[in-house]
Amino acid sequence: MRIGVLALQGAFREHIVTLEALGASGVAVRLPEQLGDLSGLIIPGGESSAIGKLMRTYGFYDAIRQQHGAGMAVWGTCAGAILMATEVLDALPDQEALGLMDIAIRRNAYGRQVDSFEADLDVSGVDDGTFRGVFIRAPWIESVGDGVEVLARHDGHIVAACQADLMATTFHPELTGDPRLHRYFLDSVVGA
Amino acid sequence: MTENGTTTTGTLRVKTGLAEMLKGGVIMDVVNAEQAKLAEDAGAVAVMALERVPADIRAAGGVARMADPTIVEQVVKSVSIPVMAKCRIGHFVEAQILQSLGVDYIDESEVLTPADEEHHVNKWEYSVPFVCGCRNLGEALRRISEGAAMVRTKGEPGTGNVVEAVRHIRAVHDEIAWLTGLRPEQLFTAAKDLQAPYDLVKWIAENGKLPVVNFSAGGIATPADAALMMQLGCDGVFVGSGIFKSGDPAKRAKAIVEATTHFEDADILARVSRDLGEAMVGINISDIPDAERMQERGW
């Protein structure tokens, strides 16, 4: 199974390493023409404003929407979750989102870096105990639409959600070495 | 590190994690809110708030200190990307002030005049993460042992001359490669020679890489310079004087951002390198008296 990882900026290498460890083929995607023949795409953590600007310059917005329409699953972590949303709260004035997933997400919701944190999460669909969530200047999901299943909450806020072949997590599974959410994406989201 | 139920802030993983998110990106020096906005608009992943860019610090001479808190605050308010700020080497009170101002990263920097010629800040005492400069592996590991959550090779700041940045990234990688070829009993002597803690030396020998993100700094002035450092294996770049000392800062900043992402694509590098206007005037390293070389600062 070929899974792309958007490699414009951010923690894309760690996603590729985890995918490869699970037997999938991880592809670093730097240009829109690399999106063909992918079963899924991960938009990694990084700076959502920087990634968004590079996406616009290189024509990624329409290309990702088009490939998603043709069956490519999408998972966004942190900045990637912001880019997938239909509504971004506290966005930059010109910030564009893909509008794929029916969620409203709040950027830098917890505050600055000193407010970044780790916490144990119960994630629905992920077995064998809690998942260590690493939240770096993280957003939270403020509200979700009807078709969206909430997978995890922290302190009342939604931090993981799923909608058919779309998944959003506001924390960083790629930083912990725990492959269970990558496994969930490959098993339950890709091809959903 | 503070604990609140199962929620923990200020952990090493949270500190190094922000640096992980900056990878593949460009961190730009800015001296006011207007420059910070321009950097954010160009696609910078973070800005470094300071009173003068290194080229101006070099020209002005005298003692260079932490920026006025008003400048730092204005920059923090003007952008939504992370904001870094510099304290003097060993000046732990400037570091305390910067943490109180809410900066996202502190750069304990040789660009400013050192406050202590023997000791660096004990960076474990802070919940805000630190980045520090290095010229070789030993220096990088000493900073990491003091609690740095990110390092950057120093280069020679404020020169627009990439030669020292190249020297330093090569030195770090050559020494990592050397360690990975040693037998276990040789690592004790290697630690002594590198003047670095044995446990970190052993970790490098086993893993073949640094335990934290390493950016390149000090002399990057063009998109090609940024791509050169990326191809040499750094994780991202700091551009100090190179942007706002050039003819068209907005265009050059955006070009360096694109070059850092597409560092292996010569067609894109050729396109973004065109018509950028005047680059900053560079300085030959041999023209700088030894006492004025910023890279020599740090122990």
Image (cartoon, helix red, strand yellow):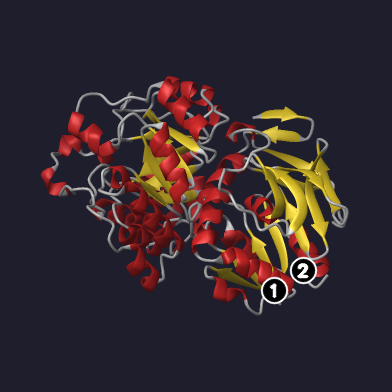
Residue B95 locus on image (x, y percent): 45, 25
Q: Is residue A27 shown to the viewer in this render?
A: yes
The amino acid marked with disc number 2 is Leu
Disc 2 designates what residue?
A: A186
Which quadrant holds the C terminus of chain B?
A: top left
Residue A66 locus on image (x, y percent): 67, 71
**Disc 1 packing (10 Å; few <14; some 14–19; many ≥20):** some
> Is B159 situated left or right of A180 in this image?
left
The residue that appears at 51% across and 24% down in the rendered structure is B101
Question: Tag 2's secondary structure?
Answer: helix
The residue that appears at 40% across and 54% down in the rendered structure is B254
Marks 1 and 2 sit apart, C-alpha to C-alpha, by 8 Å
Instruction: Examine the image and state in which quarter residue B115 appears.
Output: top left
Looking at the image, residue B218 lies above or below residue A178 = above
> Is B158 situated left or right of A137 in this image?
left
The residue that appears at 56% across and 76% down in the rendered structure is A33
- Discs 1 and 2 lie in a common subunit: yes
Q: Which chain's residue wears label 1? A: A
Task: Pick out the residue farthest to the front.
Answer: A93
The earlier-in-sequence mark between 1 and 2 is 1
Q: Is residue A129 shown to the viewer in this render?
A: no
Looking at the image, residue B59 lies above or below residue B277 = above
The reply to whether dot 1 and dot 2 touch (C-beta < 8 Å) is yes
The amino acid marked with disc number 1 is Ala
Looking at the image, residue B247 lies above or below residue B271 = above
Instruction: Examine the image and state in which quarter residue B125 appears.
Output: top right
Disc 1 designates what residue?
A: A24
**Disc 2 packing (10 Å; few <14; some 14–19; many ≥20):** many
Residue A107 locus on image (x, y percent): 65, 42
Question: Tag 1's secondary structure?
Answer: loop
> Is B169 situated left or right of B80 in this image?
left
